[in-house]
Amino acid sequence: MTTLAIYSNKGGVGKTAAAVNLSYLAAQTGAKTLICDLDPQSSATYYFRVKPKLKSGASGFIKGGKQFYRSIKGTDYANLDLLPADFSLRNLEVSFDNLKRSKKRLRKILKPFKAEYDFIFLDCPVTISILAENILNAVDYALVPLIPTTLSVRTYGQLLSFCHKNNYDAGKIYTFFSMVDRRKNMHREIIATVSKSYTGVLQSFIPYLALIEKMGIYRAPVAEFSPESVASRSYQNLWDKVQKNVLSQSKRH
Amino acid sequence: MQHNLKFKLPDGHNEKQFFGKLAERYALIRKPAVTERFAICDTFDWRLFNKSLVLYASGNRLFLRKLAEDEILYSAEIPSFPVFMRDFPDSELRHQLAPIIKMRALLRLVDVQSRSVPYRILNPDGKTVARLAFEEFRPWRRKNKSALVTHLWLKPVKGYPKYSRMLARLFQEAGLKISKKEDVFFKSLEVVDKKPGDYSAKLNIKLDPHMCADQATKIILCFLLQVMRINEANIEKDLDTEFLHDFRVAIRRTRSALGQIKSVFPIKTTDRFKKDFALVGELSNELRDLDVYLLNEDKYKAMLPPILRNDIDPLFDHLRKKRSKALQKVIRGLKAKKYATLLKDWEAFLNKPQSDSVTASNAKLPVIDLARNRIYKKYRNVVKVGSQILENTEDEMLHVLRIHCKKLRYLMEFFSSLFPRKKINVLIVQLKKLQDNLGDFNDLCVQEEYLLKIIKELPATHRQLKTTLVAIGSLVGTLGRERQMVKDAFAKTFTDFSSPGNKELFQELFVSKAKEDVA
């Protein structure tokens, strides 16, 4: 069983679109897959046409076990289940803070589900506080979407130094390029620089495309409503890279 | 988690009509139908059915499930349809089937077509909240034939239990019944007039204890004749070795019944048929011997040191050539007028009312008395000969004892319906252990002798001949050592059989009360 977070400490970088499409592609290979929508905005939940509602809200989530299990919904796709978001998750940070061993709580919540699923994907909200630490403690890998802009690269640097300062293994952090516009010189240059200066950069580029935004209209992964599109192919390419360079490699150090 | 539910649709239920009605209450989408062809398989003697298993081939895979259940236990990819276990790819499926099917050929019994139409029930958000599937089975390539079975599947979606509960209630209110024990297996076989379990090599004869002995004996013999007829028709097709084997056992049992159920028919009749059936048995001795060697090919090879394993191949090639000649001989024999006349006369005799005869003094005895008498005498016989062997183990005597045991076994099986099933089965199991020991000893003697004889037949010009001879020599050595081990085990096996406990049980079942009083 592998746990992957789609995480970023910057908003609007394409986390949810990546989480939805990657979990769908994983499930298509026959692997039992769960996607957990941890974002109170509940966009992933919306894409799967599920109501954003957890049994007993965020407190049920934190308790884990039965309450967590009973909240899981089957999606419209084979092998893919969803833990929906809930508006009360906006208080997750505070709730974790009030607990003992507060930084490892999420890891404890997910543990019983590792036997049932081959993959657990976490669609994470923007955070770099105690929730981020919970995520980093809970997952095997974190995939960070990176828009090739200076601000994005700067935030990525902040994340890595945060890991360094707090003794988190930066070797489990991988990044890929998101919302890429290859016509822009700056995008091309930043991609080249980032690929040279950091390790764990997947050579995968999700373009900036209207079709990806249309997921909100179709409420489905792109491969479902437009399987032959560039968008669908680029997510497939990202999943191939994740399988080849992340899942089948030993950890970087 | 809720389970999938299978409903039986009453005859004449129409898919369009049914889902049309459902669409008035729920948002539905229909997906394209999936059609699949599959073939139900089993051996001629229903080995899988007897274990409540259903094996079917679909596409390039084989699937195994329990009868009346839908869950697939094992499946495996097959490059082509496997006839014998050795044709199966190495898989868990093969490991499961091998001890059941053994040397029998797998037959494709019937081809069926399944058509499944998936439906989805949507909530107002367009989310799938329950899945349905309309499923029907028809005989393959007979579209106009009405469906054999029609099912409606209700497959709950995790997290939406209310919808599946509502639908289940709705279907039950509409008169649909949850289908549990039913299996498309039976209806499919009906189409091709096959009755599962209708053939078994085991004796299955029901006798009434007060029946006249001659009448009971004819019932036994009629059963055996039927077994002969069924198998004889298939020997020529050469599907597997067991048609001939079952045919030969039926003949041997017939001869044994004629000899052992004494004085129920005129002696002239008994003698004639005994002699003629002996000739029919002899006709296929060579073919059966060759079958046994070839069936054991892997076992023999495993006995050889690895370096010699391929060197024995010329021997088996030679045996295979001999076998095809031997098969032709048997086929000719079974087509000959002599055999046809024998069976015609035999059938006429079995169907003719019994005429009185001085040499048939036991004919009107109640069968139970004769059965007790014959079984107990034979048992005493076995104990007597066996005890002599314990004092002085001669190979020849072991052979004599083996024949006695066989006769006793047949008698017990012919008449088993007359005695308490559990008790007689205990004794049959005990006897079988002794027979296995004697049978192994005999087989090893015969095999050693045969191998030494066959050496002379091997083509002298063969390049590999010398190494083949070394391999055969090594094999004969191993067989000899094994024979000695089997012989050493005889004393204990026989002492177990002749134990006081078994003796008491033999007396309880087979010594009639009246006789006991006299004694």
Image: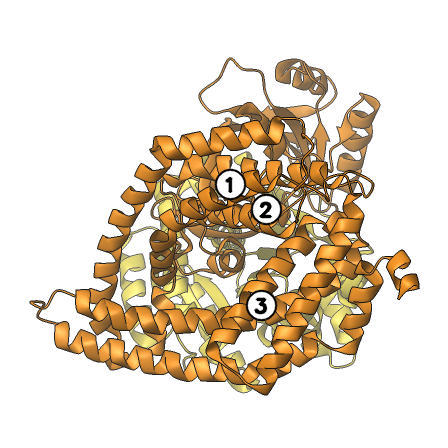
Quick check: A189 above or below B5?
below
Q: Which chain is orange in the picture?
A: B
Q: Chain of mark 1?
A: B
Q: Which chain is yellow in the picture?
A: A
Instruction: Give the residue displayed 57% in from the left and 71% down from the top.
Output: A139
Specify the amino acid type for callout 1: Phe
Quarter of the picture containing the C terminus of chain B is: bottom right
How far from the left and from the top, in percent, is residue A218? Answer: 53, 35
Q: Residue at label 2?
A: B258
Q: Residue at label 1?
A: B273
Q: Chain of mark 2?
A: B
Query: Nearer the viewer's eye, disc 1 or disc 3?
Result: 1
Query: Nearer the viewer's eye, disc 3 or disc 2?
Result: 2
**Crowding near the residue tagged with mark 2, few <14, some 14–19, many ≥20 C-alpha atoms within 10 Å:** many
Q: Chain of mark 3?
A: B
How far from the left and from the top, in percent, is residue B379? Answer: 69, 65
Answer with the quarter of the image where residue B322 lies: bottom left
Rounded to the nearest angstrom, the CA distance separating label 1 from label 2 is 8 Å
A158 relative to B26 in the view: left or right: left
